[in-house]
Image (cartoon, coloured by chain):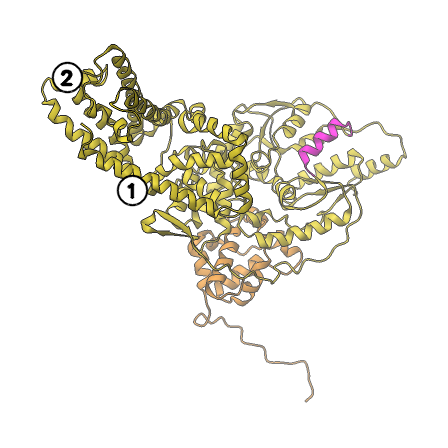
Amino acid sequence: MEKFGFSISKGRQIDWDSNDRRIADYIREREPSFKSCIACGGCSATCTTGNFTHFSLRELNILLHRGENTKPGNDIRKCMLCGKCSLVCPRGVNTRNVVFLAKQAFKKFDGHAD
Amino acid sequence: MQTNPFVIPFNLGLYFILIYAVARSVIWFRELSRPDKLRLQRGFFGKAFGQSLKEIFLESLIHRKILKTNPRLGYMHMSLAFGWFLLILFGTIEADVFGQNHLNPPYKAIFFKFFNPDHGKTFFEQGYSFLMDLILAFILSGLLLAVIKRFSSKAVGMKKTMRLKTLDKVALTSLWLIFPSRLIAESLTSGAYGTGSFLTGSLGSLLASFLPAREAAYPFWWLYSLSLGTFFVLLPLTRYLHIPTELFLIFMRNSGIRTGDKAGTFSEVEVHSCSSCGMCIDRCQLSSSAGINTIQSAYLMKAIRNSDEISEIAHNCLLCGRCDQICPVGIELSPIRMIARRAGNSENNYVNSWKGYFRSKQNVPVPKPDSKSSYDFLPGSNPGKADVLYFAGCMTHLTPSIKNAMTRILNASGLKWSFIDENGGVCCGRPLMLAGQDKEARELINYNSQIIWKTGAHTLVTSCPICYKVFKESYYLDVEVLHHSQFIKNCIDEDLVKMKFLHKRVTYHTPCELGRSSGVYNEPKDVLRHVTNLETTGFEDENSLCCGGSLGNIMLSQAKKRRIAADVTAELTRNNPDYLATACPLCKKTLAPLTKTIVADISEIAAEAIVLPEIKKNSERHKRHVRESAGIA
């Protein structure tokens, strides 16, 4: 069949029932400042790892809160914990602990991160 | 009278503790690594033995280090330890000289008065009784301080004292009962026979005036024996295990054994040598500024001893090293904390067997090393050749003024240098190490090592003390690693850069990672003295404060970090200096928002002082100078 460049786009709705928000809950419980993120992206702009890859803490934060854990699970290990993000954060989110806890949570719940 | 049933509790306790000490020592010795065993053997026949005896006398008995920092607290510890030692020593001599026969069993010396109630009639015997009373009075004065300390620690000059577990409290009570019960028992016996010296004699005659002294004494001899017996039996389960263990610690340390990075016999001995004196609590800025009173080193030691959950205690610490400096026992507290961090939060490495009397290492299956690389995205790089490398570090990239100042100084020095992380390099690895993730850190270390090695440089200058420490200790490189303060000092000494005097008043904040952690105290101050009026702050060198921003603490909230930083800036800017100087970008970043004083890095002050030499026009150097001042790199 001739291809005209049209396709049916995938569904983009977020299904709260099927999504797994245990990881976000685990972090929120232990590091309450995680809640005050406004997704400004300052952390991603200064990120040492972000200089080399598409790793973004802002994206990670959004995906984890939605419960879409596959990408964060693969990405989280790339962080070098250097802490620049926590210094630029205008909301005082303790980002190093967020990453540290996320690694722990992935280990505990589904083994995405080693 | 040869013996009496009341000595049984004391005898049982004493023989129990002796057998226990032997068994425990054998177990610990067997768990030592082979090189450490050799060190111990060499130490036993070498100089270390004499040194250890001297140190045991000065530290375990006299408590010299505590006396120096806090005389009242030192007196309390000394009177109990040294006094008790003297009491046992002179008691044994007394029993040997004045008793019916020589080489008595220990109980004859401890309960000498009971078995020799007539003792103390002749002049010489009276003199000896006086000595024994004096020692007892010495101990009781310390005991009085100890009791007061439990209710108001301020009385002995401490802000906070340890919270104890129940068993510790029972042992504490039995320890406290030992000496008063001895006093009353001896006094009553003396009163009945008309002997005793200024303490037991006078108290005895007073009590005998309205009590049937001979009958009343007997229950107190029982109490004395029981409290001794109870104390001995509880000793291995409580903090009082530090009394015998500290002797081993001193000997092992003098033999050259160190904590290292894995848990083992030595760290076990250290953990059990902690007496929970609580001096680390007052020293901790998390306690004094941020109101956190559960995580200090004494609590970490306690939690490890009790096999409690230690993850939070281990991670909620600035790793500033102030407690390492003050610890009177000399325990390597920060390395033990790092071991706890590396062990992770899931498994307890130790099991308590036989009601907690013997802890043994549990065979936790070692987790499979993950072969997957975390940082395989890092590109290969081909840096140019240079003699001197400048590694700014992540934190310096957030404080560009330091970066620019260093560029000026390096240019002025005329050396052939290269800026290896000019466009933002890779982290040095120390932040991962501080979080206990050594495997990941090693990957970054290898990556950076390759870049440095490829440049063929002989010197590596870094602006960040965090990087400095890891380059110095964990990189295996054939380059001289310098912190920028050391580099500037070298430039001044070798006359590479001319600097003028700035006529500014400056106080200096020593960064923890540069000072206590790496031992670089003098170079930064020398540089500052060369270009400014450096003033003292009362927080010099080992006694310096932590800014609170330390990457060592992953859990501390921003608000609490600010509280610590506010207290620090208040202390350091008390005399309104023109600059508050520091040598760490992270310290600068943490302190600057909390004070009106300008917080400047040493490199910025040095760069301000640079005098460029008169240079011939159109020389290469002149052209570079013009380009530079026009802002073209």
Residue B490 included in the magenta stretch of the image: yes
Residue B353 included in the magenta stretch of the image: no
**Residue tagged by mark 2?**
B206
Left or right of B39 in this view: B631:
right
Task: Compare residues B483 and B233 and report the one nearer the observer.
Answer: B233
Of helix, strand and loop, which one carries label 2?
helix
Does the rendering let one see residue B167? yes
Query: Could you say where residue B222 lies in the image, as x and y percent from the top left?
Result: 18, 32
The residue that appears at 89% across and 30% down in the rendered structure is B616
From what the image shows, is residue B129 above or below residue B625? above
Which of the two marks, 2 or 1, is nearer to us in this view?
Answer: 2
The residue that appears at 54% across and 30% down in the rendered structure is B47
Q: Which chain is yellow?
A: B
Q: Which mark is residue B167?
A: 1
Which residue occupies the extreme top position in the image? Answer: B123
**Type of residue at label 1?**
Leu
The residue that appears at 72% across and 43% down in the rendered structure is B478
Q: Distance between the Cα atoms at labels 2 and 1?
A: 36 Å
Task: Compare residues B316 and B528 and report the one nearer the observer.
Answer: B316
Does the rendering let one see residue B274? no
Left or right of B423 in this view: B243:
left
Dot 2 and dot 1 within a common chain: yes
Q: Which chain is orange?
A: A
- Quadrant of res A2: bottom right
